[in-house]
Amino acid sequence: MRLGLQVSRFTFEGAPASTGATWRAIARDADQAGLSSLWVMDHFFQIGVVGPPELDMLEGYTALAHAAAVTERIELGTLVTGVTYRHPGILLKTVTTLDVLSGGRAWLGIGAAWNEWEHRGLGVPMPPLAERFRLLEDTLRLARQMFADDDSPFDGEVLHLERPLNHPQPVRTPPIMVGGGGERKTLRLVAQYADACNLFDTGLGPEGIPRKLEVLLGHCEDVGRDYDEISKSCLAALTMDTGAALPEGVTGHSVEQAVDRLGRLAEAGIDHVICSTANSTDPVAYERFAEVVRRVG
């Protein structure tokens, strides 16, 4: 079992003047705790399940590059990038740059995009869902080509690139994570192109996850893909109890409770849990995470 951290709240005490130092401390603490991965949402406005849109939100790849400079081992990615937000060729160049500067620690986390308010607010075109999925599949195909140093013309259903040159090449081919659990399209794209899926523990739980993985297995059999090659990850709300006050409605977990919950997710077929935590700025939380990592590793 691998354990990662997603940070979704950036309205830190003293922000924005304190934001850089606080974010660096989070990244260093997560790295030193032995967490395997660090993720940020790729949003420009805060999303409704966290808070109102006016709450602080950092641009994802700038934040990850900043974290790369103060960490040594932890892998870095967005959970996940909406395919509409950046031209795919530029997106893949950005992920490659993050990989090079971090010494081979970048992921490409990607999905079909959903947040209409961000698109409308910032003037980003948001085509219909079917077209977004065509764009997503083209981007996944293009990623394989650009990460393999193939600059021959690319002709997809939506994308047409004359010369997708990508130098320098990544230090490590960035693993591709496709976010979402759509059974007909999303999980098929995972089977065809991705190194990892990402499901949401909330709403599925250990009982619902096996159903999604059965669907993924079926898609793998249909396209001739080895199911075991694909990492099965999920996003789960998991806040460690440090004795400090937590936001209203948030329950802290002891190390034993966290290990038990992760064990149930492992039994459901998950091998990489990405924790969304409500106290990411509390250094004691990382002492607890370090013990959880030791126990589940």
Image: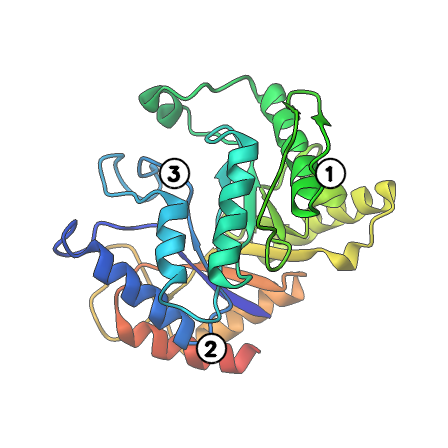
Callout count: 3
Q: Is residue 222 left or right of residue 205?
A: right
Residue that mark 3 sits on: 43
Q: Earlier in the sequence, mark 3 or mark 1?
A: 3
In the image, residue 13 above or below residue 138:
below
Tell me where residue 281 appears, x and y as whole percent.
Answer: 26, 64
Name the residue rendered at 41%, 76% in the picture.
33
Quadrant of the rendered structure where residue 152 is?
top right
Circle 1 Cα neighbour tier, 10 Å, few/some/many (<14 / 14–19 / ≥20): many
Residue that mark 2 sits on: 292
Tell me where residue 70 appears, x and y as whole percent.
Answer: 35, 67
Name the residue rendered at 50%, 31% in the picture.
113
Colouring of the image: rainbow
Residue that mark 1 sits on: 188
Is residue 62 or residue 170 the one in the foreground? Answer: 170
Q: Quadrant of the N terminus?
A: bottom right
Q: Is residue 49 left or right of residue 157?
A: left
Q: Is residue 146 left or right of residue 242?
A: right
Question: What mark, if any, has residue 241 been given in the picture?
Answer: none
Name the residue rendered at 69%, 37% in the picture.
151
